[in-house]
Structures are given as structure tokens and as C-alpha cells.
Amino acid sequence: MSKREIVTYPNQILRKQAVAISKPDKSIKALINEMIQIMEEAHGLGLAANQIGVLYKIIVYNEGSGPKYILNPKITNFEGEQIGPEGCLSFPGLQGEVKRAERVEIKGNDLKGKSIKIKAEGLLARIFQHETDHLNGTLFIDRADPNTLQYITQDQDEPVEDPVGV
Ligand code: CO
């Protein structure tokens, strides 16, 4: 019964700052479930609330170990460097090389208001950086090497899942 859809660029809600959630209630839980459903339908690895037109600080992600969420996420430490291809569900078909930190520490809250702290590296660290950027109105095209941005054409007989669509 998903009614919201993924907002695509240049919709200006993608450029807005999301606001923190002080008291998560049932509506936030429902929103998280909806975001996870939309992410899975789109075969994405992550989704920020801006991307479905909601300006709350919520991200959902699934780097392969099941869907999870973080409320009010904030990256509190960046280490190292990784350069690799990145895409975004709000830019269908577009990819580019983006330099990110190799390791991050992210803090936030769960639905009970408890603090969450996660240390991530590699792909998960990339997802966290991409999604927290969304909540601040920053998009991967702002960070991508402009010489590498290109639309990937898909063979219609053989649909290709975007490996880094976030
Ligand atoms: Co994105």
C-alpha cells in the first residue's frame, strides 16, 4: 500500500535540509517501514527521507545484512579514502566516481530514542556518507568527478541492478 514515490532530480526537496525527530511516534515507525519497502522495490542500498518527499532525518539502508534504519544520523568521524562508482535512486541511470572516506563512525537514535553508534567501512561507509548528505541537501553529483558522470544504458533484455544505487 505504498503511496509515496521516489523523488527525482531536479525536485528541490532534494536540496532541502531535513529536520531532527525529537520524539519518534507510530507515524515515524510507519514511515520507516514505507521507506524500506520503497528501497527494496527500487533495488537500492539506501534511501533518505528527502527522497520520498519527507524532510525528516531518517535513513534506511541494506548493505546485504537486512534492512535497517537510523534516526537523526550524523557522521562523527571520517578516516581514509575510497574512490568508486556511485549512483542514486533520485538520478535514474546516472553514475560517477565519488571520493569518500573509507571508514566512518555514525551516531543517531533508534525508535525508542536510544543512542546508536555504528562503525562502518567500505560499502556501508559509502552508503552512510551518501545518505547523510541527502539529509543536508547535498547530492552525489556535487561530489562526483565531473569527468566520470555518465548515464549507463541498460540492455532491456537483461535488466541490470545498479550496484550502488542509493
Ligand atoms: Co541518493
Image: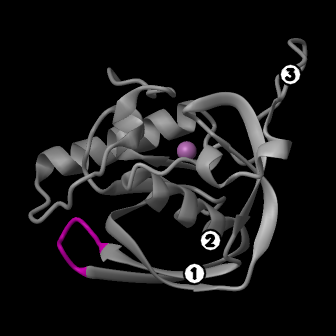
- Of residues 128 and 151, which is closer to you in this image? 151
Dot 3 amino acid type: Thr
- Snapshot quadrant of residue 25: bottom left
Rendered view: 37 above or below 66: above
- Of residues 36 and 144, which is closer to you in this image? 144
Rendered view: 71 above or below 28: below
Dot 1 amino acid type: Val
Q: Is residue 67 visible?
A: no
Using the image, tell me which numbered label, if any, was put on residue 125. Answer: 2
> What whole-number distance in Å separates the C-alpha atoms at marks 2 and 3?
27 Å
Q: Is residue 31 visible?
A: yes
Q: Earlier in the sequence, mark 2 or mark 3?
A: 2
Q: Which residue is mark 3?
A: 153
The stretch in magenta equals 109-114
Q: Quadrant of ligand 1?
A: top right
Which residue lies at the image location 26% right of the left edge and 44% below the top edge? Answer: 55
> What whole-number distance in Å separates the C-alpha atoms at marks 1 and 3?
32 Å
Q: Which residue is mark 1?
A: 104
Whether residue 86 is in magenta: the answer is: no
Is 92 on the left or on the right of 52, as rendered?
A: right
Helix, strand, or loop for circle 1?
A: strand
- In percent of width and height, residue 7 lies at 44, 27
Q: Main secondary structure of the magenta part?
A: loop
- In percent of width and height, residue 93 lies at 73, 28
Which residue lies at the image location 40% right of the left edge and 55% below the top edge? Answer: 59
User: Mark 3 and mark 1 in contact (Cβ < 8 Å)?
Assistant: no
**Outermost residue to the front:** 146
Q: Earlier in the sequence, mark 1 or mark 2?
A: 1
Helix, strand, or loop for circle 3?
A: loop
Which residue lies at the image location 29% right of the left edge and 56% below the top edge? Answer: 57
Q: Earlier in the sequence, mark 1 or mark 3?
A: 1
Which residue lies at the image location 38% right of the left edge and 56% below the top edge? Answer: 136
